[in-house]
Amino acid sequence: MSPQAAPEAQAAGFQGQIPPVEPLLTEVIATLALAAHSYLSDHEGRTPDLSSAEAAIDVATSAFERIKERLRPDERLAIAQMLTETRLTFVRKRGS
């Protein structure tokens, strides 16, 4: 990639090669799932933030639905299990 061809890509930190989207979105999905668990936490007397947790879960699920067919079966299973656990935690917290 020449400096003139894609200055915005170089400014974003891409040095000659744009990474595949799958690992980037997998990391985003995992980060959102962890954030949802944090929002659901009632540790130290905190009140769970159900609205923020729901938003994080919804965005993570949407991203997963967009890329799941492009993932290896073991990656797809791991992410599906993580999202299922996160959703179940949300439902338990919402119901209590």
Image (cartoon, rainbow, N blue to C red):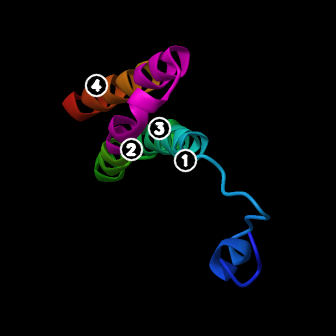
Residue 60 drawn above or below residue 87? below
First along the sequence among labels 3 and 1: 1
First along the sequence among labels 3 and 2: 3
Inspect the image, locate mark 2, and give the three-letter code of the amino acid beneath it.
Ala
Which dot marks residue 33? Answer: 3
Do residues under tags 3 and 1 come within 8 Å of each other at their CB atoms?
Answer: no
The magenta stretch spans which residues? 60-80
* Front: mark 2 or 1: 1
Q: Give residue 62's quadrant in the image.
A: top left
Inspect the image, locate mark 1, and give the three-letter code of the amino acid beneath it.
Val
**Quick one: SS at disc 2?**
helix
Within 10 Å of disc 2 (Cα), the crowding (few <14, some 14-19, many 20+) is some
Question: Residue 29's spot in the image, x, y percent?
Answer: 48, 41
For the residue pair 88 and 69, the one nearer the viewer reads as 69
Q: Residue at x 55, y 47 (%)?
A: 21
Magenta region's main secondary structure?
helix
Within 10 Å of disc 3 (Cα), the crowding (few <14, some 14-19, many 20+) is many
Q: Residue at x 40, y 30 (%)?
A: 68
* Front: mark 4 or 3: 3
Residue at mark 4? 92
Measure the C-alpha gap from mark 3 to mark 1: 18 Å
Q: Residue at x 46, y 22 (%)?
A: 76
Which part of the image, by quadrant, shows the C terminus? Answer: top left
Measure the C-alpha gap from mark 2 to mark 4: 23 Å
Residue at mark 2? 63
Q: Give left or right: position of 56 versus 20.
A: left
First along the sequence among labels 1 and 4: 1
Residue at mark 1? 21
Question: Residue 36's spot in the image, x, y percent?
Answer: 43, 42
* Front: mark 1 or 4: 1
Q: Residue at x 36, y 22 (%)?
A: 84
Inspect the image, locate mark 4, and give the three-letter code of the amino acid beneath it.
Arg
